[in-house]
Image (spheres, helix red, strand yellow):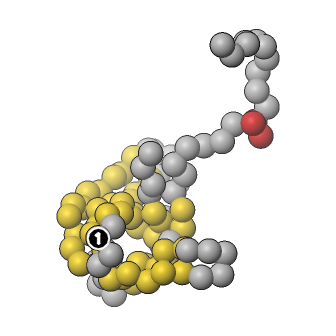
Amino acid sequence: MVKTTRETPSPSALLPLNQPQPLRVEAPDGWPVAVHVPHTARHQISSAVTSVEDIWRVEEEWWRDAPIVRTYFEVLLDTGRRMTLFFDHASTSWYWQRHA
């Protein structure tokens, strides 16, 4: 059994789960055709996108100074791996959304 200390954890003790990771994606027309997945600190594995299985757009918090506007793509790579990517329209960057 875990003993409860009743102490509030420090902010550094809390780690966010499934944080999106920046990712290099080739998308000449806004549609992903290749993904460069980080393999080690110095190397990436490049994979072609064989199909886009699903696509959806999220627009949230439109009333704030920095609304969230993202286009998500669930893709199948030539390795057989399935990934969820999104393009963040505010930062004009691609991310990989991991799922637990």
Residue 48 shows in this picture? yes
The location of residue 57, given as percent across then percent down, is: 29, 57
Residue that mark 1 sits on: 80
The location of residue 6, given as percent across then percent down, is: 76, 12
The location of residue 87, given as percent across then percent down, is: 41, 67
71 left or right of 19 in image: left
Number of on-image labels: 1
Residue 88 shows in this picture? no
Residue under the point 45% across and 63% down: 96
46 left or right of 29 in image: right
Secondary structure under the numbered disc 1 in the rendered image: loop
Residue under the point 41% across and 78% down: 35
The location of residue 24, given as percent across then percent down, is: 49, 78
Identified by mark 1, the residue type is Gly
- Residue 83, above or below 63: below
90 left or right of 79 in image: right
Residue under the point 51% across and 48% down: 18
Residue under the point 76% across and 27% down: 9
Camera-side residue of 65 and 86: 86
Quadrant where the image shows the N terminus = top right
